[in-house]
């Protein structure tokens, strides 16, 4: 089950955390994975680990906020591999702030990467998917895409927009052979989160607070989110489109 043998996949923001876990999981499932990230050092390291484990992976540098870069990456993938079966839009950035402390520039920056960036990459690959009447898009949003999150105004808006983008695309292209779904994780223990914890006056207390916000009393692991992505990318999810999965430890249930 959940085999991706013979599939071609691209994962954005795959240099660490959730993106790296998805890339590795897809490779283990048999996919040829294009690992894209702005950082060539971390991205190449992920590729090396996949190849060392017997998988097939290649690195492509990409800033998803740059529309021309997205078009060039799509051109390269199609030139090298012939097509793309699975696109995972994982890359994104965060921001802390309320309406009182968030500037217009903050809103524009978050939108340009999280929302418009997701649009840019998908738009670049969509013509080839339409031509083949085949494709899977998995958008990594956030629990902030389905509920409000304190002190995360711009981030929450951008992730709600990704969920909206997912649903609109799914409806528009349900009969074109293309499935589009979103994953909205709760807090996940990634290297980025670990680094942010060191910035708190009491990192241990901050960690416990982050865990306690989820009914299971812990953060998720990147591999748990990757498992959800594998399901949505696989043929077992052939009847699933426009869905929003929330691996969040029960956070959204309350």
Image (cartoon, rainbow, N blue to C red):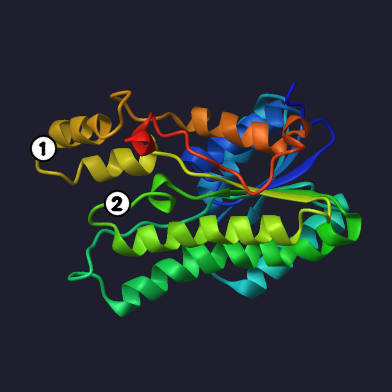
Q: Mark 2 points at which residue?
A: 149
Q: Name the residue under label 1.
A: 202
Query: Which percent across, then down, holds residue 150?
Result: 24, 53
Question: Real-space Cα distance between discs 1 and 2?
Answer: 21 Å
To which quarter of the image does residue 126 belong?
bottom right
| Above/below status of 117 relative to 232 | below
To which quarter of the image does residue 193 belong?
top left
Query: Which percent across, then down, holds residue 213?
Result: 25, 35
| Above/below status of 13 relative to 107 | above
Q: How dense is the environment of label 1, judged by Cα within 10 Å: few (below 14), some, or many (20 and up)?
A: few
Q: Seen in the image, is 144 located left or right of residue 69?
A: left
Query: Regarding mark 2 in the picture, which secondary structure is present there?
Result: loop
To which quarter of the image does residue 111 belong?
bottom left
Question: In terms of sequence position, does the residue under pointer 1 or pointer 2 come before the other?
Answer: 2
Quarter of the image with the N terminus is: top right
Query: Regarding mark 1 in the picture, which secondary structure is present there?
Result: loop
Residue nearest the viewer, comparing 42 with 35:
35
């Amino acid at each position: 089950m959940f085999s991706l043998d013979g599939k071609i996949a691209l994962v954005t923001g795959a240099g660490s955390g959730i993106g790296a876990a998805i890339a590795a999981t897809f490779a283990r499932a048999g996919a040829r994975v294009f690992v894209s990230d702005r950082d060539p050092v971390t991205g190449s390291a992920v590729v090396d680990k996949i190849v060392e484990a017997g998988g097939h992976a290649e690195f492509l540098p990409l800033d998803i906020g740059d529309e021309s870069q997205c078009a060039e990456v799509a051109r390269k993938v199609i030139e090298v591999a012939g097509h793309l079966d699975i696109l995972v839009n994982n890359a994104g950035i965060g921001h802390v702030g309320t309406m009182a402390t968030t500037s217009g520039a903050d809103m524009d920056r978050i939108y340009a990467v999280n929302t418009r960036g997701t649009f840019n990459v998908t738009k670049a690959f969509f013509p080839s998917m339409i031509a083949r009447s085949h494709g899977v898009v998995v958008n990594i949003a956030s629990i902030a895409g389905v509920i409000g999150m304190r002190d995360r105004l711009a981030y929450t808006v951008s992730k709600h927009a990704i969920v909206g983008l997912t649903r609109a695309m799914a409806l528009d292209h349900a009969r074109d052979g293309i499935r589009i779904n979103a994953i909205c994780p709760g807090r996940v223990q990634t290297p980025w989160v670990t680094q942010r914890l060191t910035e708190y006056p009491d990192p241990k207390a901050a960690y416990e607070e982050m865990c306690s916000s989820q009914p299971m009393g812990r953060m998720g692991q990147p591999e748990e989110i990757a498992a959800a992505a594998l399901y949505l990318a696989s043929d077992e999810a052939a009847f699933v489109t426009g869905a929003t999965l929330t691996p969040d430890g029960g956070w959204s249930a309350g």
